[in-house]
Image (tube, helix red, strand yellow):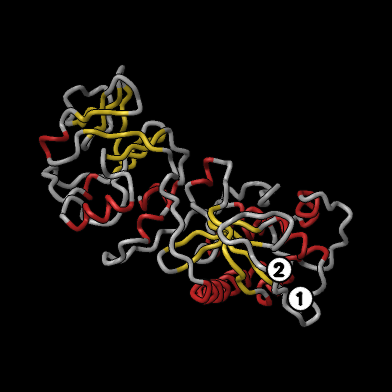
């Protein structure tokens, strides 16, 4: 495995997203699920994602905010999952539609779908609706949208296509890492020594300020605490000799590390995780009092070298999404953290 995924920790819920300052014209564009609060909470697997024609790039969004077309610097997407649509209709500055929920019922049709405005019953043909139709599912026309100040033409975009890398500053990243590590240290305290599965199920939400719930990281931390043998087996190290609890050792290892560089966006193969837009952050650890000074690949993921963590940006903070195989190998076989 590239990042560890031992087994799901299904009982750990999701964190509420941090609000993005209105004056920040960058961070909102890099948020998973286009910053939609409920989608970020539920993290559904998307069937499709649509954007208004001409509003499919960061530059276009910035222009739209400046001229009043959009209220905030967020992608005003339609994100479809099963019978629901996660929408940003309230983001359109010239809309006369009024206030509606940002999660609408989606009713399938022969040439598209309709979104119910205030109703839950697809059998109600008279319910106020927005009809999205097209000869193919790559470009749709909204029948009612032009009349209420909402874009008429919508184009299908790949879910997660908004995972553009933000500007990288190593000094700032090291400060963010230290701030994250302080939160992680605090959150992890109840689980450091012999934590039971019941404790994880009952108090797992306490990790949400530093770890993305239902992520690879939560599953790996859970396994380190309750089934350390599964951790070593998952990376082909069944014969590794485990010395004490793994979580205290992990925490000590992370405390001695410093951020060495960024390896770009993690190429996540699972749709359930791809919308996190996780970044690879390489770490350096001292050995024998010396720090490895070799060059770190810039925004390139290289395996079997530097250990790394993956993180999601949450405003001006980072939150852990995964621990690399290389980091866990060092945890199991390397010297005691200095």
- Out of 104 and 1, give the one closest to the viewer: 1
Q: Are marks 2 and 1 in contact (CB under 8 Å)?
A: no
Q: Secondary structure at mark 1?
A: loop
Please tell me whether mark 2 or mark 1 is closer to you in this view.
1
Horizontal side of 94 relative to 193 (left or right) equals left
Rate crowding at label 2 as few (under 14), some (14 to 19) or many (20 or more) other CA atoms within 10 Å.
Answer: some
Task: Say which label, 2 or 1, has the lower sequence index.
Answer: 2
Horizontal side of 56 relative to 304 (left or right) equals left
**Which mark identifies residue 250?**
2
Quadrant hosting residue 298: bottom right
Dot 1 corresponds to which residue?
Answer: 337
Q: State the image coordinates of residue 210 (x, y, percent, origin top left).
A: 53, 66
- Residue positioned most to the top: 110
**Does the rendering let one see residue 203?**
no
**Residue drawn 63% across the image and 64% down it:** 282
Say above or below: 105 vs 180: above
**Residue drawn 39% across the image and 63% down it:** 18
Quadrant hosting residue 261: bottom right
Q: State the image coordinates of residue 122 (x, y, percent, origin top left).
A: 28, 25
Rate crowding at label 1 as few (under 14), some (14 to 19) or many (20 or more) other CA atoms within 10 Å.
Answer: some
């Amino acid at each position: 495995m590239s990042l560890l995924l031992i087994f799901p920790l299904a009982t750990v819920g999701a964190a509420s997203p941090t609000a993005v300052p209105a004056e920040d014209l960058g961070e909102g564009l890099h948020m998973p699920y286009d910053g939609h609060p409920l989608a970020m909470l539920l993290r559904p697997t998307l069937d499709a994602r649509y954007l208004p024609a001409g509003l499919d790039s960061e530059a276009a969004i910035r222009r739209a905010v400046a001229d009043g077309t959009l209220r905030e610097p967020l992608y005003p997407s339609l994100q479809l999952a099963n019978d629901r649509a996660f929408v940003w209709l309230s983001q359109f500055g010239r809309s006369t539609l009024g206030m509606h929920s940002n999660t609408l019922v989606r009713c399938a049709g022969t040439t598209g779908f309709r979104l119910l405005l205030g109703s839950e019953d697809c059998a109600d043909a008279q319910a106020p609706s927005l009809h999205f139709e097209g000869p193919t599912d790559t470009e749709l026309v909204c029948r009612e949208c032009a009349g209420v100040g909402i874009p008429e033409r919508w184009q299908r975009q790949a879910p997660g296509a908004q995972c553009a890398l933000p500007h990288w500053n190593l000094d700032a990243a090291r400060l963010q890492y230290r701030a994250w590590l302080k939160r992680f240290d605090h959150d992890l305290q109840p689980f450091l020594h012999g934590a039971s599965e019941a404790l994880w199920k009952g108090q797992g939400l306490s990790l949400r300020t530093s770890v993305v719930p239902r992520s690879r990281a939560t599953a790996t931390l859970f396994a380190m605490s309750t089934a350390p043998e599964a951790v070593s087996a998952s990376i082909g190290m069944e014969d590794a000799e485990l010395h004490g609890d793994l979580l205290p050792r992990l925490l000590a290892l992370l405390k001695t590390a410093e951020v060495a560089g960024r390896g770009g966006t993690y190429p996540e193969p699972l749709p359930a995780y791809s919308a996190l837009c996780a970044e690879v952050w390489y770490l350096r650890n001292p050995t024998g009092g010396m720090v490895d000074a070799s060059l770190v690949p810039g925004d390139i993921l290289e395996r079997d070298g530097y250990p790394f963590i993956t993180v999601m940006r949450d405003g001006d903070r980072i939150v852990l999404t995964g621990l690399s195989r290389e980091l866990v190998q060092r945890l199991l076989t390397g010297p005691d953290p200095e």
